[in-house]
Image (cartoon, rainbow, N blue to C red):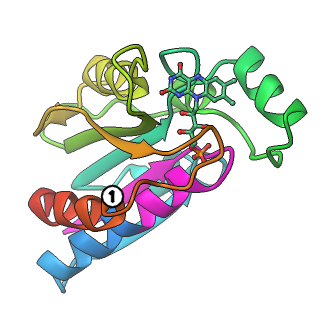
Amino acid sequence: MRAVIVYESSYGNTGQVAAAIADGVRRADPDAEVRCLPAGEAGPDAVEDADLLVVGGPTHMRGMTTGLSRTLATKAGAPEHGPGLRSWFHSLPDGGGGTRAAAFDTRADSKHAGAAADGIAARLTRHHYDLTTDPVGFLIEGTEGPLREGELLRAKEWGATLA
Ligand SMILES: Cc1cc2nc3c(=O)[nH]c(=O)nc-3n(C[C@H](O)[C@H](O)[C@H](O)COP(=O)(O)O)c2cc1C
């Protein structure tokens, strides 16, 4: 089984979640070939043979990041972090049906938080990937993080369910 976890992360929290999900997949399927890549390193070649594609990013302005939200994050001190998921999706090959997929995000614990994962899931579906589970959000304590205690373990366990 080949699994690819693709993520966008301004402050690093979503990257940590992505790595934990990758660990969970490896733990559940030790024979799996698992790659965990930032969007800028996940070109079409990296995903075309995947049996499982997991995509996640931070929630900005109640949805996926935008050019504006990424600029605001950088101005607020976040490091530059390569292309965002919106542009990454433009070069994602069509899944053609039969490739399993899942979406996740990081977000605040607020009823007004919104969810980047919903937009990610919709794009995966539009690209004919088969969502195997509902989109999931992992909670952060503030704009820059850290992740809430226990969330990395939850991400690992969620990853194991995807394998
Ligand atoms: C410009 C901007 C807008 C944000 N808007 C939201 C939001 O609408 N809802 C939310 O839950 N978190 C929001 N956040 C907090 C991010 O979700 C948080 O920074 C992110 O999950 C951290 O993940 P990262 O370290 O991978 O970037 C926002 C952050 C920034 C920088």
Q: In the image, which residues are magenta?
A: 1-19
> Which residue is at a point 24% across and 41% down the rendered structure image?
102
> Which residue is at a point 11% across and 38% down the rendered structure image?
133
Residue 73 included in the magenta stretch of the image: no
> Which residue is at a point 80% across and 24% down the rendered structure image?
72
Query: Is 10 on the left-hand or right-hand side of 19?
Result: right
**Quarter of the picture for ligand 1?**
top right
Task: Classify 134 as above or below 9.
Answer: above
Please name the amino acid that badge 1 sits on. Glu
Examine the image and state in which quarter residue 152 appears: bottom left
- Residue at disc 1, secondary structure: helix
Q: Where is residue 7 in the image (x, y as percent from the top left)?
A: 51, 48
Q: Position of residue 11 (x, y in %)?
A: 68, 49
Examine the image and state in which quarter residue 108 appears: top left
Q: Position of residue 32 (x, y in %)?
A: 22, 77
Kindly identify which residue carries mark 1: 151
Task: Classify 31 as above or below 92.
Answer: below
Q: Where is residue 160 in the image (x, y as percent from the top left)?
A: 15, 66
| Near-viewer residue (84 or 13) | 13
Task: Classify 59 as above or below 100.
Answer: above
Query: Is 145 on the left-hand or right-hand side of 120?
Result: right
Quadrant location of the N terminus?
A: bottom left
Quadrant location of the C terminus?
A: bottom left
Task: Classify 106 as above or below 67.
Answer: below
